[in-house]
Image: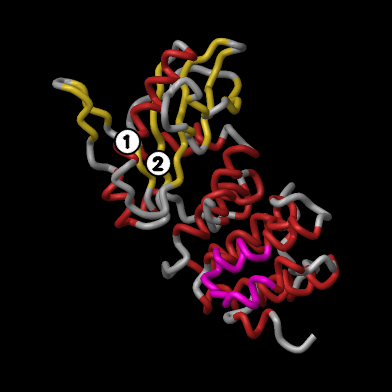
Amino acid sequence: MPSVVHEVLIDLFRHRPQLVAELLPLVTDTPLPEFDNARLESGDCPDIDPTEYRADAVIVLATGTTSQLAVVVEVQLRPDAGKSWSWPVYLTTLRARLRCDTVLLVLCPSEHTAARCRRPIPLAPGCILTPIVMGPSDVPIVTDAGIATENPELAVLSAIAHRRAPERNAILTTLATNVVDAPDGKMYIDLVMAVLPPTARHFLGSLMTAGTYNYKSEFARRYYSEGQADGEAKALLAFLRGRGIALDDPSTARVEACTDIEQLDVWIGRAATASSADEVFGVE
């Protein structure tokens, strides 16, 4: 199962496809075509056997209904040699289906993974695929309230990419004061909280406590089917994995067996700031 970080990073593009057109100029000198809309496209490659190929997300820049450029967006959390075989499939299949140029944008939360993903992929003599890769150093440092308000997804990327940078507290302050009231803003805050190191997580938590935001992981419940106990249980387990909090088998079974929505809410709220399983499942 993909990690929570992976899935919600992709959700940024699902919620706002235009984001891809704002990121590409940061990592490539190739000009974008003229377009007046950005739409999501299916990333499935159903005709390829025996393996099912599916891109994380595909955004098409178009003029009216005419496709101008298809962008395959992949979130890569760690190096994976198998991608050198699957990525070309995504591009060529989409090119044939949409009859337009295609590019590959790979989003990497670590510089090590970004460096690996930038390696050219030889396809045939005279034919080489060079992925367009965005690593942490390519993501803008967003400390401007206007930018964060206008583009909360970019502010989220900035907070994740620069979570250990000297500008971290300024970025998190901008995020907390300008993104929380945006559509899905609380979900975005939760995502950032899940990937921050402990000191930064405490700092952001103190900012949220000082405001009017009652912190709990709305993003997890929304992602796994809001209002259903089994969805919340899966959300809690996924959120804890994203936070790096290990559960033993009895604790995992306890969560999976719980049908009390209020109890699951309590655990999810604790999971936002807990550093161990004991802090999540402590004295009730």
Q: Position of residue 248 (x, y in %)?
A: 57, 77
Label 2 crowd bin: few (<14), some (14–19), many (20+), radius 10 Å: some
Question: Mark on residue 106?
Answer: 2
Residue, disc 1:
131
Image point (64%, 55%), residue name = 188
Residue shown at the point (73%, 73%) measured from the top left: 267
Q: Are marks 2 and 1 in contact (CB under 8 Å)?
A: yes
**Residue 241, magenta (yes or no):** yes
Q: Quadrant of residue 89?
A: top left
Image spot of residue 28 (x, y percent): 34, 34
Is 129 above or below relative to 34?
Answer: below
Instruction: Write the residue at 27% across / 33% down.
Output: 130
Q: Amino acid at mark 1?
A: Pro
Q: Nearer the viewer, residue 256 or 97?
A: 256
Q: Main secondary structure of the magenta part?
A: helix
Tell me which segment is drawn in magenta.
236-253
Query: CA–CA distance between discs 2 and 1?
Result: 7 Å
